[in-house]
Amino acid sequence: MSRILPPMNWFRVFEAAARHLKFTAAADELGMTQSAVSQQIRSLEVRLGTPLFVRQPRGLMLTDAGRKLLPKVSISMEHLQQATEMFDVGAQDDVLTVATSVSVAQWIIGPNLPSFMALFPKVRVRLLSTIWADDFKASLADVEIRFGAAAQVGRAAKRLEPDQLIAVAAPSFQEPLAAAPLIEAVGISEGWRQWGQLAGITPTLAPRLFVDSYGMALTLAQNGVGVALASSLLARPLIASGELKQIGDVALVSTEGYFLAVKPDNKIALAFSDWLARLIG
């Protein structure tokens, strides 16, 4: 019977932490937060059923299991590095790689991309979209737009604002909110219950439809399926164009949001960041 391997990035994080014997140093090397490194190490330990490190006040110490695993992981990563070198054609200075939430790609970047391309006619743009954070795509990116909480996205990331949770529906929507199918994105800390409390609505609002992204929630709302609770950052252009309307005036501040990180030595990436800031500002 085949076994499903743990995610590759867990091994990558383990190897860095084992070399440095500090989660903070591994986080700096990998462009992650210390808490994210610690969480992935813990996930790997749970998956393997054994501790890999002894946590000490001033650093880490490998356990016997960790010492046995490290050379095998190091060799495997070295082999992967050698295997990919044959495909390395060098840096492509005229290609801007943007790793982004699929919702941001669909509702913010995509419709406005012609204006950026007009400003930089010689630059080619590669969009790598994903619903949840993808560490492989992030490692390729010159610009990354990641959804999450501030503690998860890295020190250099800045939140795209203004961004609150608002209720939106198709322009033809006329039902009382309590009678409408409520649409909510899964995996977020705040939802219809918190929005309803802020609005002073009783009894507690309960969603009927669950989706995996704000983008899908907006699409369902556009099609008249129900009322979506979604990021105002994404919904605002649709409201301005008349494709959606806001229900009520409640705007709930969310723990999670969209965060932008840019390679500081890439001039085109910095220009893209400035262009995006003007676009949503």
Image (tube, grey):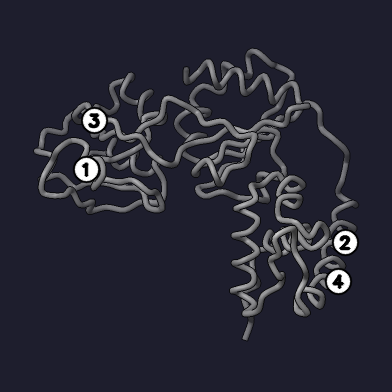
The kind of secondary structure element at disc 2 is helix
Is residue 104 or residue 41 the one in the foreground? 41
Q: Are marks 4 and 3 in contact (CB under 8 Å)?
A: no
Q: Which quadrant would residue 174 be assigned to in this image?
A: top left
Marked residue nearer the N-terminal end (1 or 4): 4
Nearer the viewer's eye, disc 2 or disc 3?
3
Seen as rendered, the residue at the extreme front is: 57
Please give the name of the residue rendered at 59% of the width and 60% of the height, measured from the top-left corner.
Answer: 39
The residue that mark 4 highlights is 71
Marked residue nearer the N-terminal end (4 or 3): 4
Q: Amino acid at mark 1?
A: Gly
The kind of secondary structure element at disc 3 is loop
Where is residue 14 shown, x and y percent of the image?
73, 63
Where is residue 4 shown, x and y percent of the image?
62, 74
Decide: few, some or many residues near mark 1? Use Cα within 10 Å; few <14, some 14-19, many ≥20.
many
The residue that mark 3 highlights is 250
Task: State the CA–CA distance, disc 4 to disc 3.
Answer: 55 Å
Q: Are marks 2 and 3 in contact (CB under 8 Å)?
A: no
| Left or right: 180 in relation to 169 | left
Task: State the CA–CA distance, disc 2 to disc 4.
Answer: 10 Å
Task: State the CA–CA distance, disc 3 to disc 1.
Answer: 17 Å
Marked residue nearer the N-terminal end (3 or 1): 1
Task: State the CA–CA distance, disc 2 to disc 3.
Answer: 53 Å
Nearer the viewer's eye, disc 1 or disc 2?
2
State the quadrant of the N terminus. Answer: bottom right
The kind of secondary structure element at disc 1 is loop
| Left or right: 192 in relation to 27 | left
The kind of secondary structure element at disc 4 is helix
The residue that mark 2 highlights is 78
The residue that mark 1 highlights is 226
Decide: few, some or many residues near mark 2? Use Cα within 10 Å; few <14, some 14-19, many ≥20.
few
